Amino acid sequence: MIILFHPRATKPRNCRMPLAALALAAVLEGREEYAIVDGNLDDTPLDSIIDLIDRHHVELLGVSVMPGPQMVAGMEVSREVRRLRPHVPIVWGGYFPSIYPDATLNARYIDYAVRGQGEETLLELIESIRGQRDLSSICGLSYKDAFGLHRNNPERAMKGPDSFPWVPYHRIPVERYLRPSFFGKRTAVHHASIGCPFNCSFCGVHAAYGRDEKMESPERTVEILQHLISQYNADSVQFYDMNFFLREDHARKLCDLMEPLKLRWWCEARVDIMSRYSDETMAAIARAGCTMIFFGAESGADWVLKDMQKGITTEQTLIMAQRTRQFGIIPEFSFVVGNPKDPDTDTRETLAFIRKIKRINPDSEIIIQHYTPTPQPGQMYGDVNDKIIFPSTPAEWASKRWLDFTLRIDTGAPWLRTRTKKLIDNFELVVASRWPTVQDIRAPKWSRFLLKALSAWRYRLHFYELPVELQWAHNFINLRKPKRESL
Ligand code: B12
């Protein structure tokens, strides 16, 4: 038996289908005995895993690991499994081992790290564990050789979603994952493409997947959505693709096919690509139920966008603020603030730019993050290669210092002055109060009025310092939120 373990990554009320485990299950289905253990649903995943090991001949424990709390949960369980049942080999896959393969292998309890797309690497690893293949022949695998030295095999070429079977939804309790959201009462998730062809020098996706994107055929995407509707009553979906709208002809076809499904949905896209779409395509996207689009606007300064190798302009972001308003779609603009070369100017220009966006489209949702470096195949954004030494073990990554870094709570960046960091955080709080997000479905109606009333004067006067009353109001509201979703 193979165990696919998805460590806890969210609060149970926010949990979504474990797409990585499901993608791996798709290639195991019908050929291997396997079990999925999801720490988002199972409060005692270690007990469940040990129980499976004691009742079956378990050949491999596969753990999906994203940087952050999921890594911590994966680390704790892996360590305990190694202590209690040392005969079971352990492999980590996902964004953490893909970006930090050496730190992963530095843990004594991890035998293998899978980088990038995992389906075929997993199948070949199983063959190798059974003595049918040499470890050195498995692309995308990192492992320890007989002398304990780390071996990083060549990258694996990516395959598109259509190359693999459908995910076996029947192997998980789908209904427990269809949670209420702003988009509907039963929101599903789907990944209709893999990878990203761009090379933004701050992002983890091309660090893990290289520079390629493969899309699922529109027909298959729609068949899967139809299945989720007919079998599980899904009424909305979040597409987790890095670029949902890469090509206009593909977007148009997909949206025309999706229109009859009457789903409300969310996706991620780029302002440069979508600002070139025709009005007809934009109208088709809106008709198909697209409710909100997440755009990485990243900065309000074109010199910063260039530095990031983002490949977009501020003008394109403003165009999309206007076009989404025209077509009744809510844009979500995300910013990565704090250019290491000149964080103060970047911050000043970006905050002014956000105010401009709000004038064009007040419904725009704004997300502000401090720049958090991720190791890159080339130079990290801001030329910070020599300014940051990443942890060398999972345990070190699990410390408060590095969890705050990963979760972008406090990056500890030497180039960001405390005053600038405070300005960014205070501005974010004022904007989030002046326009409370529509996505917080548990927030009572009165709370929106309270936050707006308290913050309006600050926003009008550009006065962001010491917003203690807003902090207090947010804490007060959070305490009074219903414990269960009301939708
Ligand atoms: C969904 C999602 C989430 C969900 C959680 C999903 C979950 N795992 O339960 C939520 C919203 C909770 C989340 C949170 C965060 N996320 Co997130 N998230 C994503 C997103 C959009 C999709 C991931 C996904 O499901 N992909 C689909 C599956 C099929 O692909 P996959 O996970 O890569 O799995 C494949 C391979 O990795 C491999 N594989 C995976 N597991 C295993 C296991 C084995 C044994 C093997 C062999 C192979 C293998 O095979 C799989 C199939 O090919 C990605 C961006 C993206 N589009 O990829 C960001 C992303 C992974 N997240 C990211 C980040 C930073 C975070 C946060 C830290 C953000 C924050 N500030 O809070 C948090 C922390 C998470 C935590 N609690 O630990 C970054 C990570 C990169 C980085 N720089 O570190 C990404 C890349 C976004 C980005 N562009 O920056 N996230």
Image: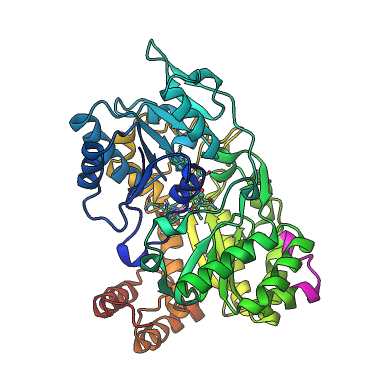
Residue 43, by quadrant, is bottom left
Q: Position of residue 147 (x, y in %)?
A: 38, 10
Judge left or right: residue 329 versus residue 280. Answer: left
Residue found at x 51% / y 43%: 27
Judge left or right: residue 294 versus residue 412. Answer: right
Q: Position of residue 420 (x, y in %)?
A: 45, 56
- Image color mode: rainbow
Judge left or right: residue 404 versus residue 464. Answer: left
Instruction: Judge whether residue 269 can be spotted in this image.
Output: no
Provide the residue span drawn in magenta.
272-281
Instruction: Judge whether residue 311 can be spotted in this image.
Output: yes
Let me know if residue 112 is in the magenta part.
no
Residue found at x 39% / y 65%: 177
Name the one closer to the observer, 277 or 334.
Answer: 277
Magenta-highlighted stretch: main secondary structure? Answer: helix
Let me know if residue 276 is in the magenta part.
yes
Q: Position of residue 299 (x, y in %)?
A: 60, 58
Name the one closer to the observer, 218 or 442.
Answer: 218
Residue lying farthest to the front in this orientation: 30
Which quadrant: the C terminus?
bottom left
Q: Position of residue 350 (x, y in %)?
A: 58, 61
Name the one closer to the observer, 340 or 225.
Answer: 225
Residue found at x 64% / y 45%: 163
Residue 300, by quadrant, is bottom right
Residue found at x 49% / y 36%: 98
Which quadrant: the N terminus?
top left
